Image (tube, grey):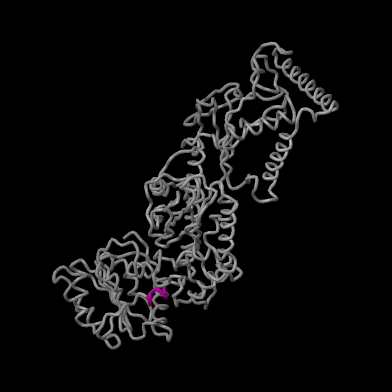
Amino acid sequence: MCASFDVKTCLSRFKAFYSYWKSSESKASDTDAFLILNGKSDDIYGKTISTQVYFFGYEMQETAMIFCKKCVTILSSKKKIEFLKALKNTDSDIKFNLLTRSQEDKDKENVSTLCQEFLASGNGKNLGVFTKELDRNSETAFSKSVLSALKSKAGELVDSSIVFSQIFGVKGSKEIQLMKKACDATCIFFSKHLKEKIMDVIDEDRKINHRSLSEGCQEALKNRELFKDFEQENLELCYDPLIQSGGNYSLKFSAENDNKPMHFGTIICTLGVRYRSYCSNVVRTLIVNPTSKQSQYYEYLNNLMDWAITQMKPGVVFSDFYNMVVNKVKTDHPKLVDKLVRNFGFVIGIEFRDGNFVIGPKSTSVFKEGMSINLNIGFQDLVNEEADSDKGKKYALWLGDVVILGKAEDGSNLVLTAAAKRRPRSISLYIEEEEDEEEEIQEVDENEESGAAKRHKTDILQKNGAQKRENGHSGDAANNAEVGRGHRRAILEQKTRNEITSEQKRLQQRRDLFDKLQTNAKNRLQGLKTDGETGAKVKSNVSYKGAGQMPKEDDVKKLRIFVDKKYETVILPIFGHPTPFHISTIKNVSSSIEADYTYLRINFHHPGAIIGPKDASNFQVCSNKILKPPF
């Protein structure tokens, strides 16, 4: 094995385990020994694997371990025993017996030793096992022989999963650091890949099904630039990311992606990354063009999550916490009580979901400081009365974060997935049709001021709620502009020609005359014909109307020089950002080779330079003192 073994951490965890076993609060005081048997199971999660990872840092198949009152005996292959040999040279009170498997007698002597150790431990009667995993972890000849021999000696097999859940539930400082790294990777994955991918699909009005989106995440996990601060070999997905939309919602982590195309309405995303076997998870709901009712419900759910996080305190029973949340919803929004999900999360760690620690109405488990909780609250089967299609009528809202109890700097609960923002403006996506927008602007311009240049919409997709809809939240400057423009238009549409006074006509004529003189002056400077004569008209060279129209090719994302032939634009990496330049701004290009390096020199036209009429025609206003960006 090329892996390293942290002996100090292993011994400290064994010490904690034995202290709990002997304590009065232990649920294993009557258990004489514990059997941890791992054959060749394909399971990703389970108490058997979690126990091996917790103590040794790695999973070890074809290995049998028996925890007795005074010693730990491990039977495994020569390579694995060599990996664990450091345990023999410790000063610990716990004795470690390491047995190497033997092919000569098919481990009969070794199995006999395990049985003797069990019979000498306590009363030698009650053997603790993981009942649900016992069958699938004893399918090989080796594991069958071990289990059969110990079964014959034990008086009773006792399910010990709850004992180890108590140990794994509370995280130490090293485990918290690993979980923080896992959660950081999940937040990066969601914010910089999955969310961006969904926004690009909406922006480009493409069709892509939920399963394809999920499968693309597997490949994205290999992106070294995205996860440059992580060891790539230690990253893996906890489960296939879930993307749900179009009225089909199942607020469970056991749900599966379907082949239906993503609907541009309410989109629920669940994603989790494992780092060195420690799991993380985040649940976010994206809403495209949310109605006022949807915004109201989502904002309430977001506030409910913040409140619930503060109510998880050491000593509080899971069922009491569950009832606190339900009662708050009853008081605030009685209609939403029946829409709540059936449970509000579970303990997360090496196992993604610990079935012994589920936050439900009947759970008797108790919150403890250092517990890692995957908190998930949601409303299902909600109805959007304003939907214009059947797919948008039924929707759900679901949020989830990973929280460590009492481990923030001020002693409060620490939210590890806060970087995946869930505030309303971060998850609201707004789409406006470009044609409708241009028609509206044109109508306002024609009524307000003749001869004025028509404005153009720059972005179809309004990201992160930067521009709210007209009936949205007050106080937003962009929103006020929209409302103001709509208000002016409403007033102008009510006016008739008879309402225009002589003074208004005179002022309008003066404005028209000023615009005409200004246009003629510009044309003369640019060598064009004036006073209505036919000639070449100069337009401002615009590569893209907005950043959303820039190409999505890998060369652009990887900050390489890219030539966009369609839009006659060269995209150059400047200060770490892809920057487009229309070809009309480029004067000339030259290259030179020195040793192993090639130097590319690009000279640009710039305002104020002495240029001829031919080059001057490339610029709308030759005297500009500032370079105008091409979008």
* Residue at 50% in and 29% down: 598
From what the image shows, is residue 80 above or below residue 604? below
Give the residue displayed 23% in from the left and 70% down from the top. 100
* Number of dots carrying numbers: 0
Is 95 located above or below residue 183 in the figure? below
Tell which of 168 and 88 is nearer to you.
168
Judge whether residue 163 is colored magenta.
yes
Judge whether residue 175 can be spotted in this image. Answer: no
Q: Is residue 244 above or below residue 518?
A: below
Tell me which secondary structure the magenta stretch mostly adopts.
helix
Of residues 631 and 533, the one nearer the viewer is 533
Indicate the quadrant containing the C terminus: top left, top right, bottom left or bottom right: top right
Location of residue 439 by image quarter: top right
Quadrant in the rendering for residue 123 = bottom left
Residue 530 locus on image (x, y percent): 73, 13
Residue extending farthest to the right is 503
Give the magenta part as a residue range.
Answer: 162-167
Apparent side of residue 70 relative to residue 369 in the rendered image (left or right): left
* Camera-side residue of 149 and 524: 524
Query: What percent of the width, then of the height, locates residue 531?
Result: 74, 13
Please check the rendered image and state whether residue 228 is part of the magenta-colored stretch, yes or no. no
Q: Can you say which quadrant of the picture contains the N terminus?
A: bottom left
| Residue 229 x/y as whole percent | 48, 52
Rendered location of residue 468, percent (x, y): 63, 46
Task: Name the residue at the bottom extreme.
Answer: 123
Q: Is residue 94 left or right of residue 374?
A: left
Task: Determine if residue 47 is in view.
Answer: yes
Q: Quadrant of residue 3?
A: bottom left
